[in-house]
Image (cartoon, grey):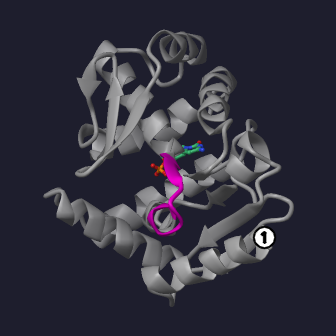
Amino acid sequence: MIVAIDGPAGAGKSTVARALARRLGLGYLDTGAMYRALTWLALREGVPAADGAALAALARAEPVSLTASDAGLRVEIAGADVSTAIRRPEVTARVSEVSAHAGVRREMVARQREIMAAGGWVADGRDIGSVVWPEAEVKVFLTASGEERARRRLSDLEGMGVAASLDEVRADVERRDALDSGRAESPLIVAPGAVVVDTSDLDVEGVVDRVAGLVEAAAR
Ligand code: DC
């Protein structure tokens, strides 16, 4: 069973995907964390976000490792534990640009397919149902109003002790939406066969119930 969960920033993908994976006893693959880890390394190494060839080479040389732990997902690249650092605003500000390069996506998608090959995964991202795993048994496109998504991002940032205003966060969410949806390479789209779920007025439990229902129906 592969469950593909795509959608814009702040729609609740990672929260829902993680909870669903736990409920169903499946693995959770956070593909955004892979693009974030590469962005973190590029910043450290001084590789410009515009240099697609250098970024793809970096992705090939330094594969991201994701491990489930009691404390959550551990993300490592080039020997560094970047689990927390990849959520910081300076990474968030650059990740859409880094992930827009075809060469970068080729590396990441190949690795994601390798990880998921044996089945038993809930994967979230922007292109799981459209590119990475179009034959997924369940495809969901999670969305929510811009206002609500900005509010959720703000509360995530507050949880990390990062100060920001709702207006700033909203502007960043909208800027990333435009980049992720407007790029030539694997843009964020509702994949053929995906069920659109608007989470604006649902709590996490409600969304997980809804998606778990889709999984149950697909398994029948
Ligand atoms: O889900 P997230 O906010 O952690 O993702 C970070 C960025 O990575 C997002 O702005 C777009 C990119 N991304 C992508 O292009 N494809 C994916 N499958 C996952 C994330």
In which quarter of the view is residue 217 placed? bottom right
Segment colored magenta: 21-29
Q: Residue furthest left?
A: 161
Mark 1 residue type:
Ala
Q: Is residue 117 left or right of residue 58?
A: right
Whether residue 23 appears in magenta in the rendering, the answer is yes
Which of the image's four quarters has the C terminus? bottom right
Residue that mark 1 sits on:
218
| Residue at horizontal 47 percent and vertical 35 percent from the top | 34
Choose between 66 and 97: the one closer to the eye. Answer: 66
| Residue at horizontal 45 percent and vertical 78 percent from the top | 147
| Position above or below: 64 against 143 | above
Q: Residues within 10 Å of mark 1 (few under 14, many from 20)?
A: few
On the image, the x and y values in percent for residue 28 come to: 49, 51
Q: In this view, does 33 lie to the left or right of 98?
A: left
Report the number of discs: 1
On the image, the x and y values in percent for residue 158 come to: 19, 65
